[in-house]
Amino acid sequence: MSENQYINERSFLYGSLLATLAYGVVATLSAICLLVLRQNRIPIRHRRAQFVYVLLLFTLSTLGLVFQVKITQAGFIEQRDFDDGTAGYGGPAAYLGKLFDHSTDPVFKGWMSCLVITNWFCDGILLWRCIVLYEDNRFWPKFFRFLPACLLTASFVTGILHLKQITAPDDSSWATSHFPFNFTILYGVVALFVNIILTTMITIRLYIHRRRAVRALGPGHGSDFTSVISMLIESAVLAEVFVIAFLVPYALRHWFCNIIIQPLIQVQAIAPLLIIYRVAQGKAMTSLPQHDNTGRSARSQSRHSTLSSLGLGSRPRLSGHRRTSSERPIVDASQNSSSNTSQAVSSMDQRPHRNLSPGFSRTHWDPECGYSYELVPTTSGDDELARPERRIIQNDLRSAPP
């Protein structure tokens, strides 16, 4: 038995063991996500959607592992004496090498289908978050909706072409040996760029929100956005590193790709599960600082989700709780009298924090931060109070939606 055959057989075996370990991580994360989602107080519609998404990822990962075990069993037990005369050696390495190159075996088709569909699910959640974040964009709104859709379409088309080619019989014109182009490399490159571009678009949008929040509310209000950005980058890097680690050896026909491709289904499922877990657990949330009448900062008793307001939990909202009667605006839209102005001035004299509407919780930010609430403090010099950090509110303000 040649040294090359030993190396290839070891690589296939190591890859199978690594896939099993990665599946343990997926199973643990899935169980934790389901438990945390059950205890979370998010709307039932969003909770059910996340439940279904987690279960689908777990199902795809489980099916992928089952198919992987069957392939390993066939290579090392049932086809241990395999030799087709083309590889220069026989045994499990020759069988598995031919199988991973292209095969009509139904088990291999099922495994490759799970790999491609899992990647579509991971790209789909990034696409949805990207559309939600850019839906209120005033500049080129159609472009920021059209670009992510085109990226996902490209991933969908190249994934189908990859499945068609890699599962084609030897005498088919779609087979790798007959077709002049390898769609496996094309699909891997497209999937990699889709993940990078969508993650970058989301990160840029969050950074813009962070900059506006810091400018309007102070440096202490940017940590929430920084935490979300870090979470997204960490989750994306995990999948991207594995894809790059597979594409380069695969293009060079190196044995290392045999190790990386086998746990790829589980690694792709880990990234969105990490996001869902951290969102549901609230690890990307921090308590927003409040100010008392003496100007000192005090920790809020309730935690408000920055992820929810940015489309990473549910639909974008300004805060994660319902307003109580004490948080109702003092200035009513139906009243247009001078008493409203004096009432607003009186309230603002007792509220040392600027850029906040009177009578509102300090987590309700002005629309300059990019939120949908339309209580707009005036910024003209005519309406400013004697104290430069105090502002009054115009009489014709519309109250926020319930």
Image (cartoon, helix red, strand yellow):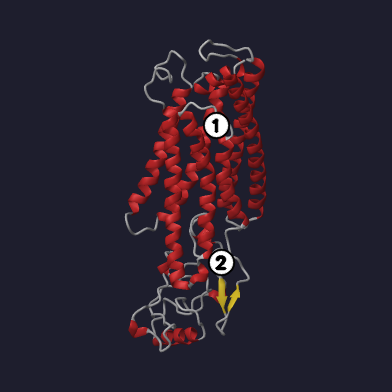
**Residue in the foreground of this view, choosing between 3 and 361:** 3
- Judge depth for marks 1 and 2 and give the one in front: 1
Left or right: 195 as drawn, with respect to 83: left
Residue 120 placed where, x, y %?
48, 38
Left or right: 98 as drawn, with respect to 180: right
Label 1 residue SS: helix
Can residue 314 be seen at all in this image of the molecule?
A: no
Query: Dividing the picture into quarters, in which one does residue 209 lie?
Result: bottom left
Can residue 362 be seen at all in this image of the molecule?
A: yes
Q: Residue furthest front?
A: 3
**Residue in the foreground of this view, choosing between 369 and 376:** 369
Q: Which mark is residue 322?
A: 2
User: Relative to 228, is 6 above or below?
Assistant: above
The residue positioned 42% from the left and 52% from the top of the image is: 201
Label 1 sits on what residue type?
Ile
Q: Name the residue under label 1.
A: 261
The residue positioned 51% from the left and 36% from the top of the image is: 245
